[in-house]
Image (tube, rainbow, N blue to C red):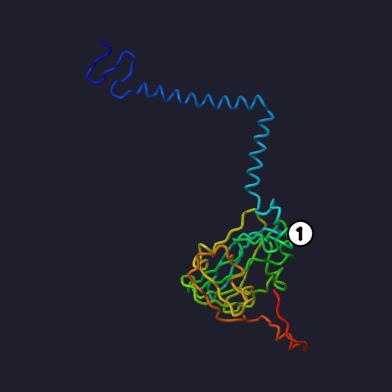
Amino acid sequence: MCGQTASSINDCHGVNLYTGSTRTNAVTGVNNGRVGSSIETFIARIRAKPRTALALVAVIGAGLTFWHLPPNTLNPFCTYRAQYRLDATLQVGGELLTSSVVRQSSQSRQWIYVMNSGGCRQRYGTALTFRAKDDRVFLIHADICQSAEKFPENPVDVIEHCSQNWPYRPIGFIVDSASKPTTWKPFNFLVGDQDAKLISMKATPTWHHPSDDLEKSAPNILKSVFETDNVNGWSNSPERIISFERRHGNTEFNVRILQTRPSGIDDGGERARRVGHRAIVPQP
């Protein structure tokens, strides 16, 4: 007989008949051995063919590089002038509100510009979002002047470089409520209009993909359509700075305009009266 006791009954090969542990361990060992052998065989084949190894490393490296490149780097139809991280601070009464985006100033390539002039817009990183304690939302577009875009390494003081030639003028938008948007109005964020003033904005070059905090700080803004008082009014409204593609098919709020002109911004009539000419329609 092969080892019959009250505490353990083993067969003649040392396998515990209650647990079968030796046999299980043996099977596991065989499987691990097969995996190890396969890996060793793969490594041996690579070592035997240096060109194959180099090609494999090159493919992996190219894939990782492409993954980390900014959008439109290799796009045959679109390109970009600059890509930067924008960090801004807005003072609203006694509050200091901050917002950050990664913005890419994308545009069509010259060879197809006529056909694709509006086809390279970004979905993310187009607007800075500031949410106050009273639930108001302050939106400022993330475009900066081209002189600020030309600094390739160090952070740039955007207010210092762009205050005299701000793209689309220094106009932001105030939405009355982040929770239930009902009305919006423009404001001049450089002069302290509506008790809100931009006090800091820095741009830093980056390879990070475009992003913003709009969905986190005021998600219902992405469920809104912003009404204007004329057909072409969208260009001076939140409609221009918040991607329509992000809101399409998901709108719940129709937000009407409350005020047509912010403080400190000249219109064509005022300029005409000063220079004695007919009114000029202001352009961004």
What crowding class fits label 1: few (fewer than 14 Cα within 10 Å), some (14-19), or many (20 or more)? Answer: few
Hey, which residue is sitting farthest front in the picture?
Answer: 115
- 269 up-or-down from 154: above or below: below
- Quadrant of the rendered image containing residue 277: bottom right
**Is any part of residue 211 visible from this angle?**
yes
Q: Position of residue 17 (x, y in %)?
A: 29, 21
Hey, which residue is sitting farthest top in the picture?
Answer: 1
Disc 1 is placed on an element classified as: helix
- Quadrant of the rendered image containing residue 226: bottom right
Marks counted in the figure total 1
Near-viewer residue (78 or 210): 78
**Is any part of residue 189 visible from this angle?**
no
At x 72%, y 72%, the residue is 165
> Which three-letter amino acid code belongs to the residue tagged 1?
Gln
Q: Position of residue 206 (x, y in %)?
A: 65, 55
Q: Position of residue 45 (x, y in %)?
A: 62, 25
At x 74%, y 63%, the residue is 114
Instruction: Give the quarter of the figure containing the N terminus.
Output: top left
Near-viewer residue (239 or 138): 239
Label 1, on which residue?
110
- 236 up-or-down from 276: above or below: above
Q: Position of residue 265 (x, y in %)?
A: 66, 80
At x 68%, y 61%, the residue is 105
Whether residue 216 sits left or right of residue 16 in the image: it is right
- Quadrant of the rendered image containing residue 20: top left
- 61 up-or-down from 208: above or below: above
Instruction: Give the quarter of the figure containing the C terminus.
Output: bottom right
